Amino acid sequence: MNKIRLRFPPSPTGKIHIGNMRTALFNWLVARQKDGELVLRIEDTDLARSTKEFEEIILKEMDWLDLAADEGVGIGGNNGPYRQSERIDLYQKYANKLIEEDKAYYCYCSEEELDQMREEAVSNDQMPRYNGRCRNLTEEEEEKLKAEGRKPVIRFKMPEIEKEIIVKDLIRGNVKFSSAVLDDFIIFKSDGMPTYNFAVVIDDALMKISHVIRGEDHLSNTPKQILLYDALGFALPIFAHLPLILDENRAKLKKRGEDSVYVGEFREKGYLPEALFNFMALLGWSPGDEQEIMSQAEILEKFSIESVNKSGAVFDREKLNWMNGKYIRESKLDRIVKLAIPYLKASNLITDNDLESNREWIERVIDETRTGVDYLSQLPAEAELFFTDVNFDDPQAVAKEFTGEDVKLVFDSLKEKTKAVDNLTPEAVNRIFKEMKKELPVGARTIYHPVRLAITGKSSGPEMTSVISIFGADEIASRLDNALKLADAKL
Ligand code: GLU
């Protein structure tokens, strides 16, 4: 039996965003599940907007997410070339074939003439569409138009008899379109480039694609493509159109500009690829139970293209953050350390020398502070207190927190008790606090709040038992003493 063949054909006209990557992921899942083959094709016929840099970003982000294709740009294969800009001859050949068979024709209409055609249709309450003016030009007429220096496009000749075009879709069932709403659409532009609808059909057919899985925004293109498959004598692939991804206001997720969601943005902010992979798998699909955290293997086992939803999938950043935080906490420490170090360095909290002399301690700090972050670029803010002196926002206001006999009692007791313990683990610190509560004539608040403030400079933050354990008795004593000095100085 032939292997099923899928494709991911992004256009390198911008940094790849989540919407496109979700399409790559769903194709990849089906390919891996069914022992099929995934082709990576680059659709770069928009010469003005396509760049090598955007193409490289596509490859890099797919690699980061562990979504390897089997064939295509950057990989090779027997069905190339895999960049559309390198396949123009092929498109030309098939366009010529359609012209020879009277299924396509040159159209010389100018922009102004087309505008006028549109306006006339609108003023007659008709749908604006090409009226077939160049459909049956005589040779002389054509020569005359050419002599005027007009550059023609090639249009597809829509079948005259109205017919129903049925898109058989794995997710949506049979979606029916009438050919009457289509006009003689352009398959080759006057700049000598094929249009998307034409090139995609030639490529999918020649690359022996059996399953076309793509975003719902392409559903309306599919009837045109089906007509082209028929006209060219190619067998139809199986279609599946994935639901749109919506933003939190249920508007279509932006592809470009400020609030768009580039894959690179998540990588740079320190999201883990497996968290984004897991999150994207749930954009339009769910395993049918409550389970949300799933490994690649579990997703592969449970996913099915037929159970993808029809309705839009909301991109919920809070959910992604929650998931990523969970992955960060549950990952092996070694890995998180490796990923976190560049962020700490970039924030000037540590240097290579610190790493050499103090690595174990830095690892403990990372281990402790990873519990409080959603993504790793947030780590320096959490970890800062371990690497810098206490920095009170408002020393004057804070001084009164360290004033009075009770605070002195608390600080003295904590200093003494932490010094007396050999191995100051978080559990040991916990025991110390328990003893202090029992022994000292003060309320719990007078213990915890001034201690946290004196040691971290803040009223909230990581677990104090861990903070004290990481700092050790000497550093704790020095921070508590400094706080008392601050109070003295203000009296
Ligand atoms: N280059 C098109 C896009 O990125 C491909 C659409 C398709 O999958 O047919 O939207």
Image: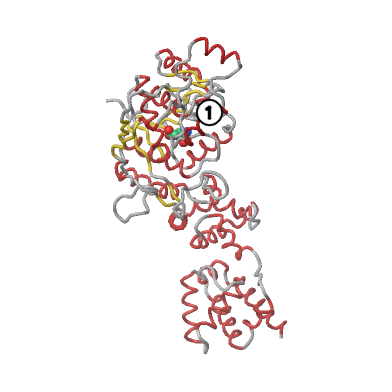
In the image, 310 versus 33, the foreground residue is 310
**Where on the image, by quarter, is ligand 1?**
top left
Could you tell me which residue is drawn at 55 percent across and 40 percent down?
15
Find out if the beta carbon at label 1 lies less than 8 Å from the nearest ligand 1 atom. no
In the image, 330 versus 356, the foreground residue is 330
Horizontal and vertical percent position of residue 377: 56, 55
User: Would you call the spot at circle 1 few (<14 residues within 10 Å), some (14-19), or many (20 or more)?
Assistant: some
Quadrant where the N terminus is found in the figure: top left
In the visual, does 220 lie left or right of 448?
Answer: left
Quadrant where the C terminus is found in the figure: bottom right
Could you tell me which residue is drawn at 55 percent across and 75 percent down?
418
Report the residue that reaches farthest toward the left: 1
483 is higher (above) or lower (below) than 157: below
276 is higher (above) or lower (below) than 175: below
Please tell me whether mark 1 sits on a helix, a strand or a loop: helix
Name the image colouring: secondary structure
In the image, 439 versus 39, the foreground residue is 39
- Number of disc labels: 1
In the image, 347 versus 238, the foreground residue is 238
Horizontal and vertical percent position of residue 430: 47, 75
Report the residue that reaches farthest toward the front: 124
476 is higher (above) or lower (below) than 79: below
Horizontal and vertical percent position of residue 118: 50, 32
160 is higher (above) or lower (below) than 421: above
Could you tell me which residue is drawn at 52 percent across and 10 percent down?
140
Q: Amino acid at mark 1?
A: Leu
| Residue under label 1 | 114
